[in-house]
Image (cartoon, helix red, strand yellow):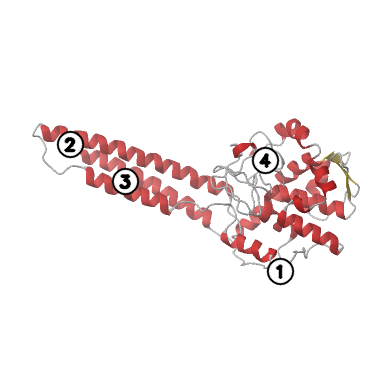
Amino acid sequence: MWSTEFTVALVLVLVTGTAVGVTRARLRRVPHPQGLSGRGLELMETAFLAGGPTRVAVTALVRMQQEGRVIVARSGLVTVTDPAPRDAVEAALIDAAGPGRQQDADVLRRQVARSAAVQEIGDRLADRGLMRRPDRHRAVVRARRVMGLALLATVVLGVFAMVDWTDRTFNGRYTGPPPVFPFAVLLVAGVVSMVATRPDRGRVTPAGRRQLSMMKEGGAWRPYDVVAPVAALTVLGALALEGTDELDEEMRAALTARQLASSSSASSSSSCSTATWCGSGSDSGSSSSCGSSSCGSSSSSCGSSSGCGSSGSSCGSSGSSCSSGSSCGSSCGGGGCGSS
């Protein structure tokens, strides 16, 4: 009887559909909704929301450089002159510089981007409903793939059921209705469920995009939580929201000087696999991964100011989009996301 095949298909679709619904509910859950803060978001939170972990690392480095607490040579070598951190991100940067207080800017960027201090910023933004957690997004993607396999199994079971019905009918052992209709109804219901539970594109939520939009309106944004000259505040605000394009040519050259050499030598020790937030940002899609490189690499990592443009990768751009399926460990479509 084809009822056996239908029962198996029904159970598969119900179980996998429930798994998709549960994982999607977890993705959309906001533990601590606080509403939008207008233009009052902190500097590092703004950098993370607009450009991901890498931009936070670059913003911290530039802030210390603007305050005269680090020296960034044009060659890309960073020297820490003031080892007293003012927040957890700076502490991670100073720690990454090592006992000699010197390190390549690209290595610092990657290590700081993966640090617990920076990762916790993403967690806070997610708890407020401004970003979506990449690990939960990956769980939804995996659940949807399993459900897709269940729908494929439904088609196969339907074919077997139809063959069995045809054989029984031809031999005069069964004259009931064909099993096409119940299998078709189940298949359509499954497809509709897949469409309805499709995860939102990008790691930044609609609330997060509204937050960024408010901060970009009305002229240059200046961080309220930084004590610095007005000129430095303008630079830091533009950097956090727009990326390194807002920096002068000499600073950009210093940040990228040793990028290629350091990324190849440090990739084995700076994998994104230890970080929840691999690379994300405004409109970032979620399948950001750094592959063999690391979270903060400008040339082959995510969390940058420009988008990947691939459907499976996410970069942290303030205005570009990279679709869904965030995961650390797959390649960032096309080989890189640019710099932060």
284 horizontally vs 152: left or right = right
Verify CB contact (< 8 Å) between mark 2 and mark 3. Answer: no
Verify CB contact (< 8 Å) between mark 4 and mark 1. Answer: no
* Label 4: element kind: loop
Residue 301 circle label? 4
Q: Quadrant of the N terminus?
A: top left
Tell which circle, 2 or 3, labels the residue nearer the N-terminal end: 2
| x 85%, y 46%: residue | 250
Residue 286 at least partly seen: yes
* Label 1: element kind: loop
Q: CA distance from mark 2 to mark 1?
A: 70 Å
Depth check: 171 or 135 in front?
Answer: 171
Q: Badge 3 is on which residue?
A: 187
Q: Badge 2 is on which residue?
A: 165
Relative height, residue 321 to residue 258 (above, below): below
Amino acid under disc 4: Ser
Amino acid under disc 2: Trp
Q: Badge 1 is on which residue?
A: 218
Q: Nearer the viewer, mark 4 or mark 1?
A: 1
Verify CB contact (< 8 Å) between mark 4 and mark 3. Answer: no
Tell which circle, 4 or 1, labels the residue nearer the N-terminal end: 1
Residue 98 at least partly seen: no
Tell which circle, 2 or 4, labels the residue nearer the N-terminal end: 2
| x 59%, y 64%: residue | 33
Question: Residue 286, how many percent across, how many down?
Answer: 57, 47
| x 81%, y 61%: residue | 233
Tell which circle, 1 or 3, labels the residue nearer the N-terminal end: 3
Amino acid under disc 1: Gly
Relative height, residue 221 to residue 314 (above, below): below
Amino acid under disc 3: Leu
The 10 Å Cα crowd at callout 3, few under 14, some 14 to 19, many 20 or more, is many
